[in-house]
Image: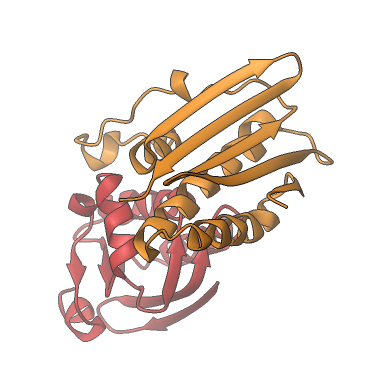
Chain colours: A red, B orange
Amino acid sequence: MEITTQEFKHGDLVAVKGRVDSATAPEFAKALEKLNENGRFKIAVEMSGLEYMSSAGFRALLACQRNCKKYNRGELVLVQVPDRIREALELAGFTELFKTFDNSVEAVGNF
Amino acid sequence: MSKITYPAKFEFLDEIREFVAEVARAGGFTEKEIYSLQLAADEAASNIIEHAYVGVTDATLDLNCELQGDAIVITMRDQGAPFNPAKVKQPNLKAKLSERQIGGLGVYLMRKLMDEVHYESKGKTNTLTMIKRRA
């Protein structure tokens, strides 16, 4: 798993690549928590390079979404979700909890 | 050789998923089905490591993966605390964000992704069997 974070005026873009499972999810969760700790609550998670995500990753997304939504207009959105991962998110009933975008410019522009 | 013993550590989930994919590919499962099988096996192994072996550092889990006709049978055995997935409450998928349950999701996914999920605890050994047939 590889995480890169870019800060924009209205929100942050977090690109997560590779595989997020129980071994790597804590690091992913920590990266998202760090943004919240720094007062950043508008986060777009870019997934085009993501090969795999288990429920451990879903939990990290859910925890961060809760945190973000506590703050005025804060939100975590998903960008370029690969088909397999979207299907799993759907199965988990998570798709209605996250707005999704086809590209990161549109996602960050939404904030 | 379709049975492998892994250290019960999250770092080995990658290998567990790879092994399941290899057997499934040989059995003619589609890439979409293979992803589902990998996810189910990962969730099952993660639960064993996290719940059955909570606080145990040198534990192992046995993974057996075989093709039977048009089905793949994934069996995991551990010697940890009994953890029966059938007893895990189903998460409410319609709940609001603030009320979403964090736990129980892995077991829910296993049941949705596989055709059959069986669990048996006998003596010191817990056996989880998951079956999926080719579409």
Q: Quadrant of residue A24?
A: bottom right
Q: In this view, does A66 lie to the left or right of B104?
A: left
Tell me which residue sits at (56%, 55%) in the image. B20
Q: As displayed, is residue B132 above or below residue A58?
A: above
How far across and how far down the image is residue B76, in percent?
Answer: 63, 37
Q: In this view, does B9 lie to the left or right of A88?
A: right
Q: Compare residues A15 and B79 and report the one nearer the observer.
A: B79
Q: Is residue B103 left or right of residue A84?
A: right
Q: As displayed, is residue B67 above or below residue B81?
A: below
Q: As displayed, is residue A93 above or below residue A81?
A: above
How far across and how far down the image is residue A90, in percent?
Answer: 24, 51
How far across and how far down the image is residue B118, in percent?
Answer: 49, 25
Q: Residue furthest front?
A: B69
How far across and how far down the image is residue A35, in percent?
Answer: 44, 67
Tell me which residue sits at (41%, 32%) in the image. B116
Q: How many marks?
A: 0
Tell me which residue sits at (66%, 29%) in the image. B52
Q: Compare residues A42 and B111 and report the one nearer the observer.
A: B111
Q: Is residue A46 left or right of residue A74?
A: right
Q: Which residue lies furthest to the right in this view?
A: B58
Tell me which residue sits at (66%, 39%) in the image. B49
